[in-house]
Image (tube, helix red, strand yellow):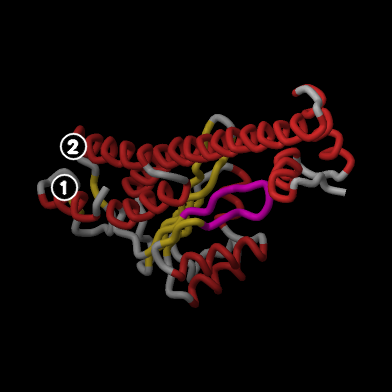
Amino acid sequence: MERGELEDAADAGVLDRGPARSGLVPDTDAVAGVFARLALELHDSAGVEETVQAVVEFALQALGCSHAGVALATRGRPEVPAVTDPVVGEIYQWQMASREGPLVVSMREHSTLLVRDTATDGRWPDWAAKVLSLGVRSVLDVPLTTAAGTVGVLGLYSATPDAFDADDEAVAHILARHASVAVATARKEASLAQAVDARKLVGQAMGILMERYGVDGDRAFAILKRYSQDTNTKLRDVAQRLIDTRKLPK
């Protein structure tokens, strides 16, 4: 969704800014239409990075926050593929290094964390002092969750104290649900693409062995598998090495 599209919706009364709050007040079915268009854009995104970039850009407009970002859960250290400002990247990296702060708790416990004012919140004093020094006063972290678990966290940041109210949180949860499905789908498609690529590589490597040594397909696959196990190397990498060098790893 283009930035202007949401702004046009606000001008048309689809989303109305309240005078006493920084976010947007939802207005019946029209809001559903805006989010439906966002969902289409997310599902049409080419990959994970494009997906989360669309999420943070939409969040910046829909919630009137100063900064936004997405951190994705991985088997190792969480990744930060999209932020609207370097400040968010710095906040994320500091939390992941110190293992302290609402992002860490939200990802671990699959819970929403709201910090109304970093100047007075006492739950994570070191984190709060760090974030306050960067000019951030309010934080809302919402988990991106699917049936398989938490895939990441959407972080919303404002330079204004107590910037996020119940309406903002409701909109953030809707956005997070859209983002969760889109990220999970993008990851699944990427994984399937890697699997298809791996099968192609193994098939090419098997063809080389069959031609060179006169073995059948089963025997060629068994040779690749044995080298993979003996060298503690992924089967895909063994196949790639054979294709590139015409030699099996020692």
Left or right: 65 as drawn, with respect to 189: left
User: Where on the picture, by quarter, is residue 97?
Assistant: bottom right
Residue to which mark 2 is pinned: 30
Picture disc at residue 9: 1
How far across and how far down the image is residue 198, in percent? 64, 37
Depth order, front residue of 94/197 = 197
User: What is the CA distance from the residue labelled 1 to the residue labelled 2?
Assistant: 9 Å
Mark 2: amino acid:
Ala
Secondary structure beneath disc 2?
helix
How far across and how far down the image is residue 19, in percent? 19, 58
Farthest left residue? 12
Left or right: 250 as drawn, with respect to 244: right
Q: Bin the neighbour count of mark 2 within 10 Å (Cα to Cα): few under 14, some 14-19, many 20 and up.
A: some
Magenta residue check for 119: no
Query: In the rendered structure, which segment of residues is drawn in magenta?
Result: 70-80
Mark 1: amino acid:
Ala
